[in-house]
Amino acid sequence: MTQPNVLEAKNLMRSFGGGTGFFDRNKPVIHAINGVSFEIAEGETLGLVGESGSGKSTIGRAVLQLEKPDSGSVKFRGTELTTLSPPQLKPYRKHMQMIFQDPYSALNPRMKVGNFVAEPLVVHQVESGSALTDRVAELFQTVGLDPSFMSRYPHEFSGGQRQRINIARAIALNPAFIVADEPITALDVSIQAQIVNLFQDLQDQLGLAYLFIAHDLSMVRYLCSRVAVMLRGRIVELAPTEQIFADPRHPYTQSLLAAIPVPDPDRKHRPRIPFNVARNIPPRDAPMIEVSPGHYVLDQEIQ
Ligand SMILES: Nc1ncnc2c1ncn2[C@@H]1O[C@H](COP(=O)(O)OP(=O)(O)OP(=O)(O)O)[C@@H](O)[C@H]1O
C-alpha cells in the first residue's frame, strides 16, 4: 500500500542579491531555488544531491519554514505552511526537525549535552522532572550513547558521538520528518556508515521520513528510496534510487555517478563534470518529462 505524503513542495522559488540599496544594487540576483517540486511519503527517504551552491540547503530551510520561500507551496500532511504566522507554525515545528552538517557548531559548548537534548522537551512542555531525565536517558540509548554521558560537555565527544547527540535532540519530540543537511560529510569515512545505519534504524523504529541532503551519490544509495539531483537551483532528474544508478538520463547525473570512486586500477582518468553541463543554468520553465514510471528528467537534457 502506498503511503500518503508527509511533505509536498511545489514550485519553490528563492532568490538572493539584487538589492536596491546604494552598496548592493549591482549585486547579481542568484536564483538559489528556481522552481523546485517534490513529495516525500510518510516513512520515506528522498535524497537531494548536487554540487555546492546548487540550492540544497536553501530547499531544506524553505520546507521547514526556517526561511520563507519567495513563492511556491509547502504542505505538511496536507496543511499549507507558507501562509502561517510563527505562532501558527509552532505546533508543526514539533513534527519537523533539522540535522546539520557540522555536529559541533550545532551544539552549545557551554551546555551539558543532556540539557541540550532535553531542551525541545522543555520548550514544548512535553516532560519535566524525573520523567524528563528518563526520556533523555532513553533518547541517548536510542542513538547508541551511554546515558551516563548526559552530564558531559560537547568537547568531550568525538565527531560521530556529537552527531548522535544532535540526532537524539532531533528525535526528542517524535517528529514525522527530518531534514538531514549533509549530516555525515564532516565525519571520518569509517564513522559515516555507522551514522547512515543509525538513520536507517531510527526510520524503522519511528517511521521517520527524511530529506537527506548530500553532495555526492555514494551514501545516498544505501539510505534513499528516491533521489533528486539538483543543478543550479533546479531538480534536473528525480527517480527511484536504482533507476538513477542503472539508467541516469541527465548528463549531470551521469557525471555525479562517474565521480563515485571505484577500486579499479585500470581507470586512468579522473572524471570531471563536463564544462557545458556545470555551466548550464537549467531554465525555470523547462518541464520535467516522465521517461519511465517515477523517473523524471528535465525536458531539454534527456540523453
Ligand atoms: N542568505 C543568503 N544570502 C545570499 N546568498 C545566499 C544565501 N543563502 C544561500 N545563498 C546562495 O544561494 C545559492 C544556493 O546556496 P545553498 O547553500 O542552498 O547551496 P547548497 O547546495 O546547499 O551548497 P552547500 O553544499 O555548499 O551547502 C548559493 O549561490 C549561495 O551563495
Image: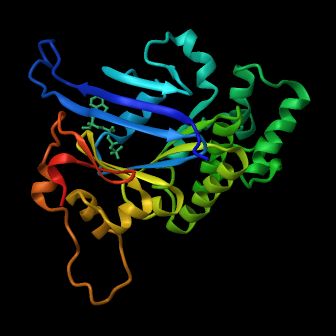
Find residue 134 and report its image quarter.
Answer: top right
In the picture shown, does residue 185 fall above or below 72? below
Examine the image and state in which quarter residue 26 appears.
Answer: top left
Colouring mode (rainbow / by chain / secondary structure / one colour): rainbow
> Measuring 75% from the left and 38% from the top, which residue is drawn there?
114
Residue 196 vertical position relative to residue 136 in the rendered view, above or below: below
Judged left or right of residue 236, residue 149 is: right
Q: Residue at x 62, y 60 (%)?
A: 197
Residue 156: give x, y in percent of width and height: 67, 51
Indicate the quadrant where residue 177 lies: top right
* Nearer to me, 13 or 42: 42
Q: Residue at x 15, y 38 (%)?
A: 283
Q: Residue at x 72, y 37 (%)?
A: 112
Q: Position of residue 255 (x, y in %)?
A: 24, 64
**Residue 217 rendering spot, x and y as whole percentages:** 39, 61
Ligand 1 quadrant in view: top left
Q: Is residue 138 left or right of residue 200?
A: right
Seen in the picture, residue 73 relative to 294 is either above or below; the reply is: above
Give x and y (percent) for residue 302.
19, 55
Tell me if residue 66 can be seen.
no
- Is residue 257 found left or right of 269 in the rendered image? right
